Image (cartoon, rainbow, N blue to C red):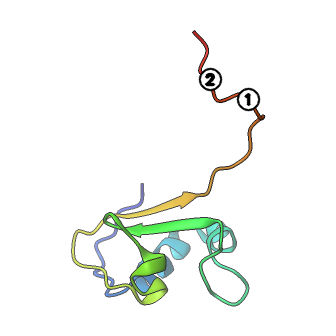
Amino acid sequence: MVKSEASPRTLDDALQILFQVCPGIRDRILTDQGEIREHINVFVGIEPARYTGGLSTPVVDGAEISIVPAISGGRPGSSRLPS
């Protein structure tokens, strides 16, 4: 968890703060063109940024931003949990 005293106005502003603290994470979240990677889900509160304006999504004071990589894979037929 990264907390900031700054008041970012947009998701892009907030991510720039994150990238200053953790520079190596930028390429994991954004493409070379500066867009959110297809397999990365970013939420501002409970709203997916993909549907609320992308990097232009407004960020209110105290908002929680979650960065969640997509999960896939597994073995066919392995959906049963062990007993």
Judged left or right of residue 60, residue 8 is right
Quadrant in the rendering for residue 46: bottom left
Quadrant in the rendering for residue 76: top right
Quadrant in the rendering for residue 3: bottom left
Q: Inspect the image, locate mark 2, and give the three-letter code of the amino acid beneath it.
A: Arg
Q: Inspect the image, locate mark 1, and give the three-letter code of the amino acid beneath it.
A: Gly
Please give the count of numbered marks on the rendered protein. 2
Asked if 34 appears above or below 46 in the picture, the reply is: below
Callout 1 secondary element: loop
Asked if 61 appears above or below 68 in the picture, the reply is: below
Please state the horizontal and vertical placement of residue 72, each as a whole percent of the image.
69, 49
Residue placed furthest toward the left:
61
Residue placed furthest toward the top:
83
- In the image, 49 versus 62, the foreground residue is 49
Which residue is rendered at x = 42% and y = 90% of the image?
A: 56
Quarter of the image for the N terminus: give it. Answer: bottom left
Please state the horizontal and vertical placement of residue 37, each as a whole percent of the image.
65, 74
- In the image, 2 versus 70, the foreground residue is 70
Asked if 56 appears above or below 82 in the picture, the reply is: below
- In the image, 16 versus 60, the foreground residue is 60
Check whether the beta carbons of the residues at disc 1 and disc 2 lie within 8 A of each other: yes
Q: Which mark is residue 77?
A: 1
Q: Which mark is residue 80?
A: 2
Decide: few, some or many residues near mark 2? Use Cα within 10 Å; few <14, some 14-19, many ≥20. Answer: few
Estimate the spatial distance between the alpha carbons at disc 1 and disc 2, rounded to whole Å. 7 Å
Which residue is rendered at x = 55% and y = 74% of the image?
A: 19
Please state the horizontal and vertical placement of residue 75, each as a whole percent of the image.
78, 34
